[in-house]
Image (tube, rainbow, N blue to C red):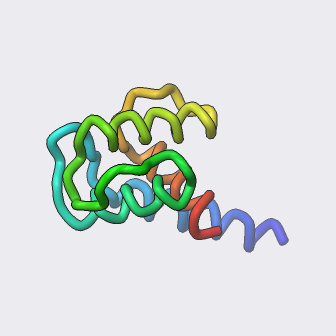
Amino acid sequence: MGIILCSFIFYTEIQAKSMPTLSLGSQGDLVLILQEYLYQAGHYDGSIDGYFNLQTYDATRAFQQRVGIFPRGIVDPTTWKAIINHYYY
């Protein structure tokens, strides 16, 4: 059991660290994925358009606060890890 758990944690760390940091002004497919996740999590009700705007920023902060991350509104590896853990596992 310990080996499987360690492998899972290591895999999640690699996934999160390979993701780029997103912040106000970012755009693209990863922002679209972020917005969809934040919508599914109940934090975002704006357009899912791939633009990291103020609504995306506020929703990111709300998610971060909910999971115990300091709410900076920037999607860094710590936030990606929380998203991966909450959404995919």
Q: Residue at x 51, y 35 (%)?
A: 62
Q: Is residue 72 left or right of residue 54?
A: right
Residue 8: x percent and y percent?
Answer: 64, 68
Q: Is residue 39 left or right of residue 51?
A: right
Image label count: 0
Q: Residue furthest right?
A: 1
Residue 64: x percent and y percent?
Answer: 52, 37
Q: Is residue 26 above or below residue 67?
A: below
Residue 17: x percent and y percent?
Answer: 39, 54
Q: Is residue 11 left or right of residue 57?
A: right
Q: Residue at x 41, y 47 (%)?
A: 77
**Which residue occupies the foreground of this view, 50 or 1?**
50
Residue 69: x percent and y percent?
Answer: 55, 32
- The quadrant of the picture occupied by the N terminus is bottom right
- The quadrant of the picture occupied by the C terminus is bottom right
**Which residue occupies the foreground of this view, 11 or 80?**
80
Q: Residue at x 37, y 56 (%)?
A: 35
**Which residue occupies the foreground of this view, 59 or 80?**
59
Q: Is residue 44 left or right of residue 19?
A: right
**Which residue occupies the foreground of this view, 2 or 22?**
22
